[in-house]
Image: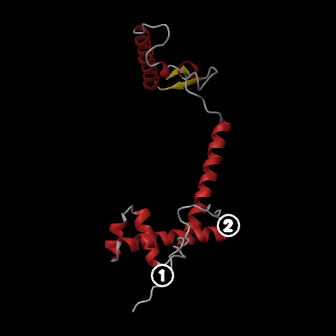
Amino acid sequence: MKTINLKKYYYPICKKDTFVEVPDEVADAIAEESRAENANDAKQHYHCYSLDASPGIEHHFPEQVISPEDILMEKETEREQEAARALMMERLREALATLTPRQASCLHARFWDGKQFKEIAEAEGFTTSAAIVTVRNAIIKLQKYYIKRGWMKPPKEKAICTKTAPPKRNRKKTSAKKS
C-alpha cells in the first residue's frame, strides 16, 4: 500500500493536503497518468511559437468546480421541470379525450407519427383536404378547450387557428329579366 496526496493529482477538486492509502497498482496508474499529462503539456508548450496564444489553450484552463449550492439548484430546477412536464401531459391527455376518434387518429398520425396529410388520407380512406380540415378542426377544438380551462390565453386576432368565416363578397344584383 502506498500513500498519495490527493492535492498533488486532483488540485482543482481537492485544495487541501489529503493523504490516502491506495494499492500499489492504483498509485502506479495515477502516477503514470500524471506523467503522461505533464509530458503532453510540455510537448504543447515546446511547439508554441507565439507569445499571444498557444495551440489548444482552451484545454489549459482548470475546470469549473461546481459548488454544492449549484448542484442543489440544478436538482431543484430539474424537479420543477419534471413536475411541469407531468402537468402538461395530464392536461394534454384530458384535452385529447374530448376529440372524436377520427380527429384523434388524424392528429396522432400527423404530430406523433410525422405522417404527411396525403399518407393520413390514404390510411383513413378520405381525401387529403378532408385530412387537413380534420387536423385543423382538432387543433381548434384543443385550443378552445385549453382557453376554456384557463390553461392558455386566447390567440390574437390574426392567429393561424382562428376559425372565422371569410368576408362575403359584395355582388351586384342584376335586374335583367329573362324572357
Residue 24, how many percent across, how many down? Answer: 45, 23
C-beta proximity under 8 Å, tags 1 and 2: no
- The answer to which of 63 and 140 lies nearer the viewer is 140
Q: How many C-alpha atoms fall within 10 Å of the one at disc 2: few (<14), some, or many (≥20)?
A: few
Q: Is residue 15 left or right of residue 51?
A: right
**How many marks do you count on the picture?**
2
Residue 57, how many percent across, how many down? Answer: 48, 18
The correct choice, above or below, for 70 with respect to 146 in the image is above
Task: Please name the residue that numbered disc 2 is placed on.
Answer: 150
- Rendered-image quadrant of the C terminus: bottom left
Q: Inspect the image, locate mark 1, and give the three-letter code of the amino acid beneath it.
A: Thr
Residue at 61% across, 62% down: 157
Looking at the rendered structure, the secondary structure element under dot 1 is loop
Question: Which circle's residue, 1 or 2, is located before the other in the chain?
Answer: 2
Q: Inspect the image, locate mark 2, and give the three-letter code of the amino acid beneath it.
A: Gly
Task: Please name the residue that numbered disc 1 is placed on.
Answer: 174
Measured in 3D between alpha carbons, the distance from the residue under mark 1 to the one under mark 2, in whole angstroms, is 50 Å
Residue 71, how many percent across, how many down? Answer: 63, 39
Residue at 58% across, 61% down: 158
Looking at the rendered structure, the secondary structure element under dot 2 is loop
Coloring scheme used: secondary structure
In the rendered structure, find residue 85 and report the number of the disc placed on it.
none
Q: Is residue 102 left or right of residue 17?
A: left
- The answer to which of 23 and 150 lies nearer the viewer is 150
